[in-house]
Image (cartoon, coloured by chain):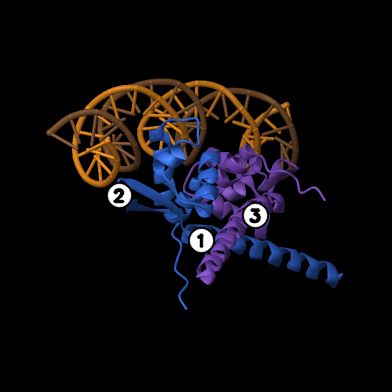
Chain colours: A purple, B blue, C brown, D orange
Amino acid sequence: MVVDQLSDAELDRLFQAFADTTRRDIMRRVTVGEYSVTGLAALYAMSFAAVQKHVAVLERASLVTKEKRGREQIVRGNHDGLEKARRLLDEYEAIWRQRVARIADILAEK
Amino acid sequence: MVVDQLSDAELDRLFQAFADTTRRDIMRRVTVGEYSVTGLAALYAMSFAAVQKHVAVLERASLVTKEKRGREQIVRGNHDGLEKARRLLDEYEAIWRQRVARIADILAEK
DNA sequence: ATATCCTACAACCAAATGGTTGTAGATCAG
DNA sequence: CTGATCTACAACCATTTGGTTGTAGGATAT
């Protein structure tokens, strides 16, 4: 099984996307329900264009997908991006555990 | 049990810190071994000052700690930051699973 | 004591980010 | 057809980011 490779640029975009409070809030919303871009924009004290840009950032990071429905664009959470980000942090967690185990071994040798 | 609250600014800093390839690489290194700032700087094709700034970003995000040892500053991985980032992504994962479960219920009702 | 090493930080620069307003193309309602 | 709605995108602006070089101070070695 080839676990698809995460490029540096892809991870940059992923974590960059998470690095903004408004975008994290959008993520929660669109995972639970369906929102048009205008529907999302109504939730925040900023212009429609600003929210649209945030959605674009999430979309480029594969955290969200857009689907055209009539004149609206429905934004939905995309599990792929989230999964990739989690995978990286899990990897770091594993490295951490190895370190802890190694230190325990060293102490045990004494 | 009060699970310490993650402020928006704290999370912004955390994910921002992860959103750079060099910083992610530094994270791996300092989790496994011990590095001075100069030791880290030697690994990358950029100036000492640039690496120093990257370390500072990681430090402000609680992903790394510095400890003075003689004239050197030893950089070490800090589990706290990593844990907080993982907790947020786990939370999103939980929201996702609830959604999937809810959709399954709706389908079952038919 | 002096020279070297390690670090911190300021000043600067180009590019990216997060916001704005304005314009224009689709789609829908009357 | 006309007008309203939804979206996309360009242009602009201030701030942040990621890099540079240069300066200076504290710790070490000879």
The residue type indicated by label 2 comes to: Gly
Q: Is residue A55 left or right of residue A107?
A: right
Query: Label 2 lies in what chain?
Result: B
Determine crowd level at label 1: few under 14, some 14-19, many 20+ residues with C-alpha closer than 10 A. some
Same chain for marks 3 and 2?
Answer: no
Q: Looking at this view, is A51 or A71 the one in front?
A: A51
* Residue D10 horizontal side relative to residue B73, left or right: right
Q: CA distance from mark 2 to mark 1?
A: 31 Å
Give the residue pinned by disc 2: B70
**Lower sequence index among marks 2 and 1:** 2
Q: Is residue C13 above or below residue A87?
A: above
| Element on which disc 2 rests | loop
**Which element type, helix, strand or loop, lies under badge 3?**
helix
Q: Which residue matches tag 3?
A: A30
Amino acid bearing label 1: Lys
Q: Nearer the viewer, mark 3 or mark 2?
A: 2
- D18 vs A6, left or right, is left
Q: Residue at x 53, y 65 (%)?
A: A106
- Give how far across and how far down residue A69 sits, in percent: 75, 44
Judge left or right: residue C26 versus residue B32.
Answer: right
Residue B66 in picture, x, y percent from top left: 37, 52
